Amino acid sequence: MGYMVESDQGAAGGGGKSGFRSLVRRKRVDSVHSKTSDTGHHQLAKELSIAHLISIGVGSTIGAGVYILVGTVAREHSGPVLAFSFLIAGIAAALSAFCYAELASRCPSAGSAYHYSYICVGEGLAWIIGWALILEYTIGGSAVARGISPNLALLFGGPDSLPAFLARHSIPGLGIVVDPCAAILVFIVTGLLCVGIKESTFVQSVVTIANICAMIFVIIAGGYLGFKSGWIGYELPVGYFPFGVDGMLAGASTVFFSYIGFDSVASTAEEVKNPQRDLPLGIGAALSICCTLYMLVSVVIVGLVPYYAMDPDTPISSAFASHGMQWAVYIITTGAVTALCSTLMGSLLPQPRILMAMARDGLLPPFFSEVNKSTQVPVKSTILTGLIAATLAFTMDVEQLAGMVSVGTLLAFTMVGISVLILRYVPPDEVPLPSSLQAAIDSVSLRYSNNIHTEETDVETSKDQSGVSGEKSELLPRKGEASSKYPLIAKVSAQAIFNENRRRNVAGWTIMLTCVGAFILTYSASNLGLPSLFRFTLCGIGGVMLLFGLVVLSCIEQDDARHNFGHAGGFICPFVPLLPILSILINMVDTWMRVSVWLLIGVFVYVIYGRNHSSLQHAVYVPAAHVDEIYKSSAESLPSQQ
């Protein structure tokens, strides 16, 4: 009939079909119904405004890397056009930011990309995204903390100037260099995060402002020196493109990772006062500020010193020193230290919220989902995150693992782009409800089944009596009367329903084909070890599939149900499907192979625990249009039961 329900009760019992079903089952967007019925969890505090979100985004994005990248990238890739490399990378990051902005405003709950993937794609891929982000934030926080002590030592006079209890020490026989300063800083940040989101964000704002002031000093003082010296860095016989356009693009791909961090804003969505307005503005403003600062610093430093003469380790400090401003090293080092501290807070902030979101969905033990009553922060998850990060920062040289940090974000960026395409063309038309509402679901199901049966009877009677008696035909329900009596049945014809199902099937397969094409193209283009003919053939196949998907999605209509998906009134991503497809293409790289062991562990944990404890294990899937009516029927039945 026109109304079907589906239970996933057999998903845990084994079998290929039920096992696959558990991977593709999707949860619904958090709503008033789900939040009021969720009495087992305390809600996070709604304390964040646009200013807080900008502080989180800028603080998480601008790290100490920019103080080094300008030298390395200019010497090896971009040359004097380094600012254009930062601009191109910023535009590429903006593609993902647009997708994040729409999903964050429509689905303002903790969990960021994990949450969006669970709603739009399915439980299996959502678990992979969440598991990869856990690794990223843990290793990222540890690597950042490990990099603070050398920069902090410079403020005390030299590499070995820290007090003994903070200085690094080598353990004889084990080859381990412990870093007490890194561990202490992680514990301090963990304590701040446990106090409350508003308090920790205020501290991050202060530290971020100090970092921005240091960058503004570089821009203003460097600009003065540049005008005074005549911008000798731009007076080159080889022109502004010594490495060609390819070098500029290679530099853009390198500095792209300096924009990773604005996704931390999306992880705080549940704590934002007005998420539909503030989240898109916070993400956009943070990315714009970072891109502007990066470009201005690049323009100044490249102009002070020729690109080939830059110090790859301390490009900014050495540039000022070459013009007689050795004292500027203290301001620049202060900026690097504050940048690292702010990035450390930005790395440790999202992980407890992702753990909390996964535990709320039953994929992790309930321990992670508990929210402290007084601070309204997931204190237990925060403390555990801090302990693990502090242990890694204290005992391990995480530089070898730092290459994995970006992998989780690239996977998340890719999945967010796919989620926007799904939201626009094939949004979920069935949503899960708890099995406790089974009585109300059966009641509404029976009601619509009877309506459909009555409608079919009326249609058959109309066919039998058409053309026989005009008076008898007038006794049958007119079209307007039938519409008022059966609004959901008379809304669309059978042909329209068939066309809509066909459109959804075409859109769904096209989205999958587009993703496969993007993967083939990026894999073959980046894998230089493949034979040339085979590599170019794969590139052609992937490019054709990608172009075909773009053309088809541009020609077919988007789903009308997208207007009712999630919370209304938020940001709408422009240029769909082009913008999400470009975002997928840029972020879909094969670096995830480096964390294959971690992902395999995640698959094992999901199969053993998450799959069997998922909150959707016994959910009943109903048409999205009938959810409110089911809840209303359930509420009406409560007084009679009492």
Image (cartoon, grey):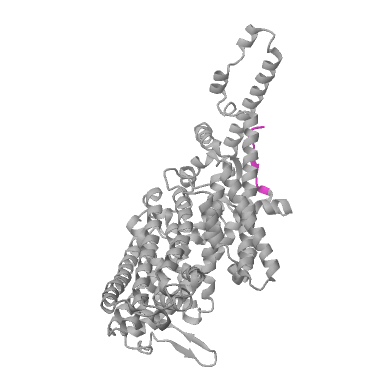
Could you say which is closer to the camera, residue 503 or residue 633? 503
Could you say which is closer to the camera, residue 402 or residue 546? 546
Q: Residue furthest right?
A: 15
Main SS of the magenta part reads: loop
The residue depicted at 42 percent of the width and 71 percent of the height is 82
Could you say which is closer to the camera, residue 107 or residue 257? 257
**Relative vertical location of residue 347 with respect to residue 313 in this rendering, above or below:** above
User: Can residue 311 be seen at all in this image of the molecule?
Assistant: no
Q: Is residue 335 toward the left or the right of residue 633 in the image?
A: left
Tell me, yes or no, whether the highlighted magenta stretch contains residue 6: yes
User: Can residue 57 be seen at all in this image of the molecule?
Assistant: yes
The stretch in magenta equals 1-9
Q: Picture coordinates of residue 205 (x, y %)?
A: 32, 65
Q: Picture coordinates of residue 344 (x, y %)?
A: 41, 71
Tell me, yes or no, whether the highlighted magenta stretch contains residue 361: no
Q: Is residue 231 toward the left or the right of residue 404 in the image?
A: left
Q: Picture coordinates of residue 217 (x, y %)?
A: 28, 73
Count of marks placed on residues: 0
